[in-house]
Structure formats: structure tokens, C-alpha cells
Image: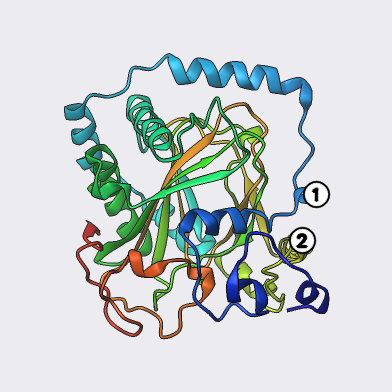
Amino acid sequence: MTKESTAASNSYLVGENASREDVDQPWEQDNQAWWDWYVSLGSEGIDSPVDSTRIDAINAALEQSLTEVEPADDDALARELETPYPVTQDQRAFFQRQGYIKLPGVLSRSAVARLRKEMLRLFVAEFGLDPDHEASDRFLSIEMAWLDHPIIEGFVKSSRIGGLSAELLDVDAVRLYHDNLLAKQPGCGRTPWHNDRHHFPIDTNDIVTAWIPAQAIPAEMGPLSFAGPIDAYRQVEHIPFDKFGKSYDQSVDEVLRSSETVQLYSEPFAEGDVSFHHNLCFHSAPGNRTRFSRMALANTFFADGARVVKRPTMVSGDWRKFMPGVEPGEMIDSRLNPICGHR
């Protein structure tokens, strides 16, 4: 921790999370509060300027795409989510080398439309607002929705998505860590550079997040950005994490952009594209400058047989709710961690 960040404060932190300099402590609030805190660590100066002349056209195109497709019915959706998606050896090799991959057409446009319809309904119920039309500039999150909502359960436990995750990790089977319905509202800032090694308190590097957009994501909406190759994280390991301010995001960005061996990838997502990023892959996302929420379902899977790390930190959030009854050092096999896919 740097001296200046030690003297700083962050209004989103409470208790010992606010008073202590380190992160070697439990998170003291709920997971929505965690997201409010974490997004506050993003440095706006990193993002490229938005071309204001394009925004009206981008918003019009988004509005058309969000209304012109009929959502899939239950039967069609179930069939699609259980149909394998063929992955090539070149795609596996790319993921293993780079730590991420974006696959085209993993879902149909009608499946994406059904996902967004369900997510909108749940955000209205959870937060009392329509995230597209009552923006609060926040990064909204709903976790573990699969337990109570069959449509979300279908996407989370999909053998199509889970099978792809096992194939890319090259493991026999994957279990669910948790699902996460995400809405980056209009005006919400960037998601800071990070990898998930410390976010998920799981003692393996065989962890992947399937990031499933619920609409197309143009550059102005903030698509995920990745740093490859997979070991790019080694170049920023020396940078102290700043839990109070933006210095970590700024410093990581400077190192990654100046490196001769790191390649940054940030491209729009078409409807139906799904990305997968490895536990070690550094990634971020620009802010959302459109008038619609950037919605995505993020499912995190890990190799069957993994254990909880011995010392989870506050960066792991409220991890016990995702693995009830599993203690540090124990194998993860609770009822909330079902096997979702096989190689």
C-alpha cells in the first residue's frame, strides 16, 4: 500500500475495511456494496474519449436491436442451452495461450432477448427501478438468481456454456462458483484492471468466467477488455493494490500499455457472442456512455475437486454465501456448487 493511499479514505468502505490499510480481512457488507466500492477504484482518465457525434446513432441502433427480436420460448431456449457448441483445437489453444476468448454465435438472438427480458424483470424487482430508464450511474448486481428463477437457472446450468468452460480449461468437469446478473447503467464508470485470482477464494487456477452479454455491446457501452498473453499478470505483480483510490488501476494500465509483450484486446460484442476469461487473465471495461444498461450474466466455474483457499480476503466479498458449509481448506462440493459441464 502506498503512503498516499494509506492516508486516503473511501466512502464505500465501513468498519475495519475502512480503517485498516490491508485487504487481509473479511468483507463487511453485502455484494452490492462490494460492487459500489470496486467500481469507485476505476480511473476515468484511462478510457478513450467518446465520439459524441456517434452516440445518437449508437443509441438508435441499440433501441432497434432491443425491440426487433422476439424472445425465445421456454422449449426453444431449453433445447438451445443443452445443445453442444463445437470448439476447435485452435480455439482451445488460443484460450490457453491468451487467457481469454470471445466466441461468436454461442447464443441465438432470440435467446439473448429472452435473457435480457428476464434480467430486466429481476432488476426492477430487486432495485425498484428500470435500469434502462431510471439510471443511477451504478453497477447493479444480483447474485444467485438461479436458485429462484428457472430461466436464469437454465443459462447458469446450461451444459452448452458449462461444456465450453470445461473444454477451454481442459478439465474433466466444472462446478459453479456463482452466477452474477450485472447491469452497468448509463453513466457508470469503468471497471478497473484486475484478474480474478483474489476475487474467487478457490485454491486452483482452473477457473473461468463465462461472460454472456444480454444485448450487443458497442465500444461506447463498455465491452470487456483483455490483456494477453495469460501471464501478463506477472508484469504488474509488483504494483500495490489501492483499496481506497484509483492508483492501482492507473498504474496497471500504464505498465500494460507500455509493455512490448502484452497485447490489449477491446472489441464490440455482437448479439450472441460470449467471452470466457481465465482466472489469471487481466481484464477491465470502459464506462457506459449509451442510454441503455450494459447487461450481462457472468457465470464462474472451477475444476471439480478444488478447495477453498486457507485465507480468503475482503477482495473475495461475501464468499461464504456461494459455498455454504465449506470452510477454508475444504473441498468445494456444496449443494450450491453443482457440476455444470463436462469436457
Q: How is the image coloured?
A: rainbow
- The image shows residue 60 at horizontal and vertical percentages of 60, 16
**Which sits earlier in the primary sequence, circle 1 or circle 2?**
1
Measure the C-alpha gap from mark 1 to mark 2: 8 Å
Residue shown at the point (83%, 74%) measured from the top left: 4
Q: Name the quarter where the N terminus is drawn.
A: bottom right
Q: Is residue 85 visible?
A: no
Residue shown at the point (34%, 32%) measured from the top left: 118
Q: For residue 71, what is the image quadrant? A: top left
Q: Looking at numbered disc 2 in the image, what kind of residue is underneath it?
A: Gln
Q: Residues within 10 Å of mark 1 (few under 14, many from 20)?
A: few
Q: Name the quarter where the C terminus is drawn.
A: bottom left
Residue shown at the point (66%, 53%) measured from the top left: 264
Q: Are marks 1 and 2 in contact (CB under 8 Å)?
A: yes
- The image shows residue 111 at horizontal and vertical percentages of 32, 30
Q: Looking at numbered disc 1 in the image, what kind of residue is underneath it?
A: Gly
**Residue under circle 1?**
45
**Residue under circle 2?**
250
Question: Position of 236 compared to 151: left or right?
Answer: right
Residue shown at the point (55%, 81%) measured from the top left: 24
